[in-house]
Amino acid sequence: MLAINLKDKVALVTGVSSGIGAGVVKVLTKAGCSIAGCSRTEENDKTITSLKDDLEAVGQQFFYRRVDVTKEEQLTKFVQETGEKFGKIDIVISNAGVNVFRGAAQCTNDDWMYNHELNLAAHWRLAKAAKPWLEKSENGVIVIMTSNHAFSSIKGCFPYNVTKTALTGLVRSLAIEWGPAIRVVGLAPGFIETPGNDKWFESFPDAEAERQRTIKLHPAGKLGTPEEVGAWCAFLSSSLAAFATGTTYLLDGGRSAILQDD
Ligand SMILES: NC(=O)c1ccc[n+]([C@@H]2O[C@H](COP(=O)([O-])OP(=O)(O)OC[C@H]3O[C@@H](n4cnc5c(N)ncnc54)[C@H](OP(=O)(O)O)[C@@H]3O)[C@@H](O)[C@H]2O)c1
């Protein structure tokens, strides 16, 4: 039977306190990893303690640190501490990020800089800090969480869409400069059921009506789940995906296949 086996691998995942990051940890736990996770949330938060309990229940370890990924010093310290704790890092899932939807005319310089630091620069800095550890792994992998906004966008989603598009260039550069020791792939989810995505629906007068309308626009007939994104991260991190590098995979329930809505 073909199975994704990441037994004894160490994965570092950012943004584990919510949504996709928490889903990634749940799936990587089932694939056999020990995991270092971070976010700005306190360690005693119930999502964090539940992820820790699940890992420890199956004999794998969880290491958590409060980290603001826009603060380079905190980020590099977290990478160093992870490497020292586990003796290695095999997989990096660079996931932390939030929607910064302002619109091109309304976007201030502060919005632009915040979005740039969080949704672009932090991914590059994390990759750079993890590089020496990943080079020592037999199968070093970086998965960078970009977005369907890297391929098409919606009015008002500037400047988020700009940095998510730029991440596809980051993926290409890192893959060609750091391969074959390290594979680097982008993963571009579409609408995924997360607290981050709920905020999008809540920006409409009737959030549930907008959610149902959006579901109908997806050939898959549903929105994605954090665990479905986690499953792609597990596959892309495994030796089954040894030929996957330098590109960004779109995971959008078929939404982008439609040229014009009915
Ligand atoms: N959901 C979707 O439909 C969707 C679609 C495409 C792409 N994405 C991408 O997927 C990633 C996760 O999104 P999500 O929907 O799961 O969002 P979410 O539910 O809002 O979770 C965001 C995660 O990022 C962390 N985070 C935010 N700012 C941070 C910072 N400065 N330092 C450290 N951690 C930080 C948050 O933790 P704290 O608040 O505790 O720090 C949280 O764990 C993002 O990169 C997003 O752009 C999501």
Image (spheres, rainbow, N blue to C red):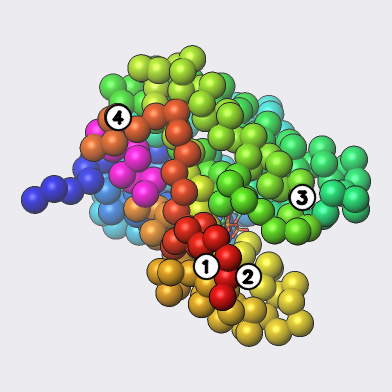
> How far apart are the alpha carbons under marks 4 and 1?
30 Å
Tell me the amino acid under the disc marked 3.
Phe
Q: Nearer the viewer, mark 4 or mark 1?
A: 4
Q: Nearer the viewer, residue 1 or 83?
A: 1
- Cβ–Cβ under 8 Å for marks 2 and 1: yes
SS for tag 3? loop
The residue range painted magenta reads 232-239
Location of residue 107 in the rendering, given as x and y in whole percent from the top left corner: 87, 49
Q: Nearer the viewer, mark 1 or mark 3?
A: 3
What residue is disc 4 on? 243
Sequence order check, earlier mark of 2 and 1: 1
What residue is disc 2 on? 198
What residue is disc 1 on? 193
SS for tag 1? loop
Residue 153 visible in the shown view? yes
Q: Residue at (68%, 47%) from the top-left corner?
A: 161
Sequence order check, earlier mark of 2 and 4: 2
SS for tag 4? loop
Tell me the amino acid under the disc marked 1.
Glu
Report the disc number at residue 158. 3
Left/right placement of residue 208 relative to residue 10 reads right
Residue 68 visible in the shown view? no
